[in-house]
Every structure is written in structure tokens, then in C-alpha cells.
Image (spheres, rainbow, N blue to C red):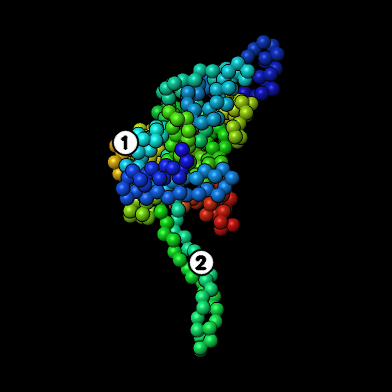
Amino acid sequence: MTLEEIRGRLQGDIPGCQAELVVNGSPSAQNSLLIDRQHGLEAARLLRDRLHLDFCSNVTAVDWPDQDKTEKIKTKQTVDGVEKEVEETRKTKIPGYLEVVYHLFSMTNKEGPVIVRMRTANRTDDVTLPSLTPVWRSAEFQEREAFDLYGVVFEGHPDLRRILMWEGFTDHPMRKDYVPPPDDDLEILRER
Amino acid sequence: MDQDLKTELSKHGIFATSFEELYNWGRKNSVWPLTFGLACCAIEMIATTMARYDLARFGAEVFRPSPRQADLMIVSGTVTKKMAPQVVRLYNQMPEPKYVIAMGACAISGGPFRDGYNVLKGIDRFIPVDVHIPGCPPRPEALIHAFMALQDKISAQHLTGESRPRHLKQELPSEFPVPEFGEHGLEPAQNDEIFHNPLKVLQG
């Protein structure tokens, strides 16, 4: 089953579900499906029960920080009655988000992986995604890992605690903007 | 006693020694390590105890599974920040006299994981280390060499006087503070009483 077909099934069977094909341009061409987080759980149920993707082998997260994109756009403007082509640099700020990636396989149909992604609204205060642990039990520990290291909050997870770092740790060390506690000998090396 | 006199006497079949020498000779040949491994260096440590390298030749074949019965802690592998309090706690539970070998790049400095968020930059930040061995992992020969260096250290210890080892000085601690899990890392990040940053020392 191709990703396009899966995308068609998701959008056809679940009203309002948005599925988008994320193309991987590298030679591996591991394309994936981006599913909107409101319908994530329903989509996962459909993938497991109807499309027989019965095994979730891997869950991981990606941190996409805020990006500044500078574009040069040529526009036509009339200056003093003469039409001129003016080059304008336009800066757009692409807000960052956290992305969770699921690798799904089908044991019954012997196929896979089907890669499914979900994105949070931002990376500060709205970082919730539906937990897919009720659908694939194997996601439990790996969602806890994504919660621990990236700070993605999984709604509906049965036991959402930190798994690698200790309780009381407040940072998310795999985020791009994580700053480790200052190290005195590194400071000495910098002074030299 | 004069060394020349001792050799002269031994030529006549008389063996002369001091209590200190006898005591240290006994100690250095029965250093029992703690059964305690942290990472890949532990595999090398296990290999050292097996028949090919045979650590038993040096009196260290009995790995004790309880810190109460052990004399030596071989910190073999990466000490994560989550593990560090437990390592210090195990060390505190060992009876004096006790020794520590920091085995491998990770145990002495954090090694290749030094910049990681989860790795302690050397166990000597929290407990006193007697012998450091570099290597990733060190060969069994290196561990044996470290062991022999420790034996030399033990046999050179004086039981009286100012230079006597820590366990014979009443005022010195035999337990060291266990670090706590903080919000961003271990608190404190090192025990300043025993850890002297080599770079800081170089700076003066």
C-alpha cells in the first residue's frame, strides 16, 4: 500500500482529517505522512485496524527551532511615474515546533515501514499531541523518552513520567536550544 | 633497619622485617575488588580476571558482591549523572582502608561523552581516586599495571607519622557527601574539597 493510498483512506474515512505527504528528497526516499494532531488517535486506530499496521517499532521526536527565512522578491513599483523593478528582502519568521515520528510495520501483510508524523503547535506552551500508546502498546516507553528529552506532552498516555533523566530535572536536553550546566574547566580553556 | 644489613642477614637464612612491611605485604596481596561494572570497561575488567590475564596472581581474584567486604572499587566505565550518587554511596559503604581505580577515559574525565548532558566528567569529582588508567577501553595489561601501581602505593604507606594514609587519620573523613539530583544537574557539581581541577591548578 502506497502512502498516497493510505492518505486517501485517512482523508476519506475520517471526516476532517488532514494528511500531508512529506517528501524525503534523499536517495533513501523515505517519504512520510504528516497527520494533524486533532485526528491523530482516530487515524492511528484506522491504520492499525483497517490497514493492518499492527506493529509500531520506533517513536522519536525532532525539534525544529524558530527559523528566520530571508527571501528576495522582485516587485514592480511606480516611482515618479516610471515603472521600476525593485528588489525587496522580505524576512519571514517560521515558528518552531516539535515533531514526533512513528515507524509502523505490518506483520500480517509483511510490509513497512510506514512513517507517520505529528506536529505540535509551537515549542513553548502548546506542546501536546495525542498519545498513541492506547493503539500501540510498544509506544509507551518511547513516548516517555520523547516527553523526557524533547518535552512533548502526550495526552492520554497512561504513565507519562521522565524515563531517562531524574524526577525534578526541568530541562529537555535534546532540544536544540538546550544549554548544559556551566563547566568550569571549559571556561578556563576559553579564557586561554 | 638498614637495607644492607637485611640482605646480609638473609644470606645467612635470617629474615628480618618490620611490622609495617609485614602488614602492608599482607594488605597489598589481598585487595578484593567490588563486583561492580558500569559499561564496556567492565567487560575488559572481567577479561582481566579470567584465565588468560589471571588477576588472581595478584591476590585480587575474589570479587566481593557487597561493598562491606570489598577493599577496592574499580570504576569501570561511563559514570552517568544518574548513577553518580549510587557510586558515591557504594564507596561510602566500603570499610577503610579502601582504594579506587578509575578505569578508562570515561571514568577519569567523561571520555567521548564528556560534552553529553548526562555524563559525569570524571569520578574524581566526588571520590578520591588512587590510580587513573587512560584507554578506551584499557587493555587488561593496563588494568594489571594499575593494580600493580596500587600495590606499590600500599606497600609504601607508613603506618605512623604525618604521611600515614587517610584511614589512619582520625580527623579525615571516610565518607564523602553524596550529590543530589538538581533541576539542571548534580548538586553540587563536584566536591571541592577533593577535586582540584588540573586546569585551574595550572593557572595557579
Categorize mark 1 by other alpha carbons within 10 Å: few (<14), some (14-19), many (20+). Answer: some
Q: Amino acid at mark 1?
A: Pro
Asked if marks 1 and 2 touch (Cβ < 8 Å), the reply is no
Residue at (53, 52) in percent of width and height: A186
Left or right of A24 on screen, residue A143: left
Residue, x 59% and y 32% (percent of image)?
Answer: B137
Q: Position of residue A98 (x, y in %)?
A: 41, 50
Q: Which mark is residue A134?
A: 1
Under circle 2, the secondary element is strand
Q: Position of residue A45 (x, y in %)?
A: 33, 38
Which of these two is toward me, B201 or B22?
Answer: B201
Q: Residue at x 46, y 20 (%)?
A: B64
Side (left or right) of A45 relative to B3: left
Give the mark count: 2
What amino acid is found at the position of numbered circle 2 in the picture?
Thr
**Real-space CA distance between mark 1 and mark 2, rounded to the nearest whole angstrom:** 42 Å
Which residue sits at x=42%, y=50%? A20
Q: Nearer the viewer, residue B168 or B83?
A: B83
Which quadrant of the figure has residue B1?
top right
Q: Name which quarter of the figure residue B55 lies in.
A: top right
- What residue is disc 2 on? A70
Which label's residue is closer to the chain start, 1 or 2?
2
Task: Sort mark 2 into few (<14), some (14-19) or many (20+) by Cα contacts within 10 Å.
Answer: few
